[in-house]
Amino acid sequence: MSFIVRVWDAPTRLFHWLLVFAVVSLVVTANLGGAAMVWHFRLGYGVLSLLLFRITWGFVGGYWSRFKTFTFHPSVVFNYLKGKGTSLESIGHNPIGSLSVMAMLLFLTLQVTTGLMSDDEILNSGPLTRFVSSEWVVLSTTYHKNIGKVVLLFLIVTHIIAIALYYFKKQINLVKPMITGDKTLDVEVTQSNDTHADHLKSVLILAVCVLIVFFSVSYLER
Ligand code: HEM
């Protein structure tokens, strides 16, 4: 018998694909430089809003989007690595996938934060540069331009390779659930809530995150 389970609620899916769009656009605008940097900044504020949203959603969102459902004890991760994982650990993010998700969220947050304190010494400086020492600005700029970028690129490439390996080696399509929200499983498990009320809740949370970022940046740039 098989069961169709709503794993990824619509807000989580929308978060994911908006994040992909924003990160790709950030790379493009950073490489174009010049006038495109206005959009690099705007997209950076967009990613900050998305991250604030996702962190909040990790506590109040759909069941499988909550951090508690994809925080595993190290022994579970090691067992999974040794091929001794159970199918119940792979309903949402599996033990290895969860590490990759946590790392991406952490390094994206670091990338945005250091961006706020970066200065290219030509035209563009982040809104926090005025409030920190010049040593911090140099450190943040170096991290933002040389280290964080590479770490994120590595994490994203690994993320995409892992998804491709699941598809080609294990015949498991992880992308479809990130589009439709559903997985077909042979066990009946908790569904992620994904009703109109949940969507309204997510819109309100996102609106608050956007407003916090917008007003903070407007205030800092005065
Ligand atoms: C800029 C590039 C990308 C970034 C930063 C990124 C980031 C993320 C993050 C943060 C999550 C966790 C979602 C959540 O729980 O909120 C995730 C999951 C996922 N992403 Fe991406 N992603 C990227 C590109 C892609 C691409 C191109 C694909 C499709 C080929 C993809 C497919 C997936 C899938 C299927 C999952 C769920 C994995 C699972 O079942 O555990 N991602 N991604």
Image (spheres, rainbow, N blue to C red):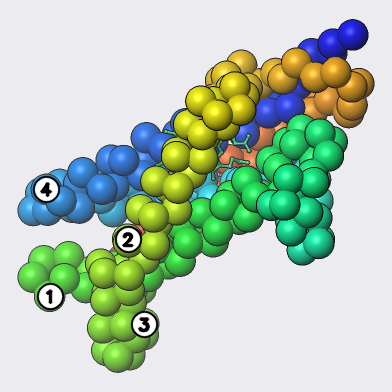
Which amino acid, by three-letter code, is at mark 4? Leu
In 3D space, how far apart are the residues under numbered discs 3 and 4 (Cα atoms)?
28 Å
Residue 11: mark: none
Return the x and y of residue 32 as percentages of the image width and height.
11, 48
Report if the beta carbon of the residue with label 1 is closer than 8 angstroms to ligand 1: no
Q: Nearer the viewer, mark 2 or mark 1?
A: 2
Q: Going by the image, does 196 lie left or right of 45?
A: right
Q: State how many labels appear.
A: 4
Which amino acid, by three-letter code, is at mark 3? Phe
Give residue 126's quadrant in the image.
bottom left
Return the x and y of residue 22 as percentages of the image width and height.
36, 40
Dot 2: what SS?
Answer: helix
Return the x and y of residue 19 as percentages of the image width and height.
45, 40
Q: Nearer the viewer, mark 3 or mark 4?
A: 4
Return the x and y of residue 127 as percentages of the image width and height.
32, 68
> Which badge, 3 or 4, is on the more N-terminal residue?
4
Which amino acid, by three-letter code, is at mark 1? Glu
Residue 32: mark: 4
In 3D space, how far apart are the residues under numbered discs 1 and 3 (Cα atoms)?
16 Å
> Residue 155 or 125: which is nearer the viewer?
155
Q: Give the answer, above or below, for where 148 lies relative to 187.
A: below
Q: Give the answer, above or below, for where 146 lies relative to 91.
A: below
Report if the beta carbon of the residue with label 2 is closer than 8 angstroms to ligand 1: no
> Which badge, 1 or 3, is on the more N-terminal residue?
1
